Image (cartoon, rainbow, N blue to C red):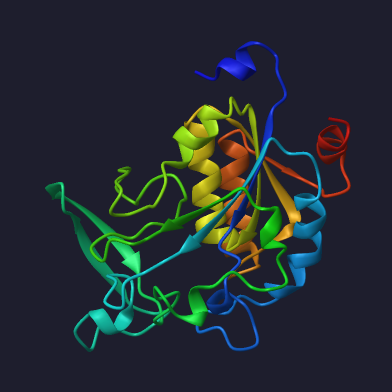
Amino acid sequence: MNLALDKGLFRPALLVVDMQEDFCPPSGSLAVAGGRDIAPTINELLSLPFIIKVATKDCHPVNHISFAVSHEPPNNKPFESFGVISNPSRDSQYYDIPLWPVHCVQGTKGAEIIPEIEISKLDEIVEKGRDKRIEMFSGFLDVFGGKSTESASLDLAGLLRGKNISHVYIVGIAGDFCVKCTALDAKNEGFEVYAVDEAIRSVDPGNSGWGAAKKEMDEAGIRIVSARGPEISKVKDL
């Protein structure tokens, strides 16, 4: 249930997902091709009169479960191996996660939002993935569908509801992982969701990555829109 939507209100929020040094060339440990190039488009959106503008960022402990080095060989190859994790709150619940290079460790340069993003225009920053035991792609929930202050610094859904948000516009990295998961959870939380195509980059920009993510989002009722489209013009008109 979304009271703003029920009343026919248009109260949009902008979510900037994981625009961090470790996800951007040239030196990021998990760099996504073209990641830094979308900053100008994101800054254009940050200049628009969204009700609230929120960034998410991975903020992992050094021994996070998603790091390949946190697992025993030989099944600990970044980008190739998968690890099975259990839900600390429910031992019978398991999840297969891809294993990554060490990235976005708390207190390191790699965890910082890139300087090309106009951070002063953000209202809030949500730190996610802080619990070493749990993977958290989405800014809303961990992979088990849970939320806690151990995993994230803020309850993103609660923050948006507190501002009576109706629509969520999503940009950032990576389209086939954190952007997609954040968008799907936003939709499940009752918001209308738009993903701004030109302001998203993916680990796999092809059909099996971003293409599959777009299909999954479309099937969930999430619209992929253009930064020059009418959905953005509607924000400008506020």
Q: Position of residue 115 (x, y in %)?
A: 68, 73
Q: Who's the residue at 56% across and 36% down the image?
A: 220
Q: Quadrant of residue 120?
A: bottom right
- 115 to the left or right of 84: right
Q: Who's the residue at 33% across and 43% down the image?
A: 145
Identity of the residue furthest to the top in this view:
7
Q: Who's the residue at 45% across and 33% down the image?
A: 158
Identity of the residue furthest to the front in this view:
120
Q: Position of residue 25 (x, y in %)?
A: 64, 83
Q: Please name whichever residue, 204 or 164, is drawn nearer the observer in this view of the structure.
A: 164
Q: Would you place residue 148 above or below residue 127 in this image? A: above
Q: Please name whichever residue, 112 or 192, is drawn nearer the observer in this view of the structure.
A: 112
Q: Which quadrant does the C terminus fall into?
A: top right
Q: Who's the residue at 32% across and 80% down the image?
A: 68
Q: Would you place residue 197 above or below residue 58 in this image? A: above
- 186 to the left or right of 42: left
Q: How many marks?
A: 0
Q: Position of residue 90 (x, y in %)?
A: 14, 46
Q: Quadrant of residue 80?
A: bottom left
- 83 to the left or right of 98: left
Q: Position of residue 56 (x, y in %)?
A: 53, 56
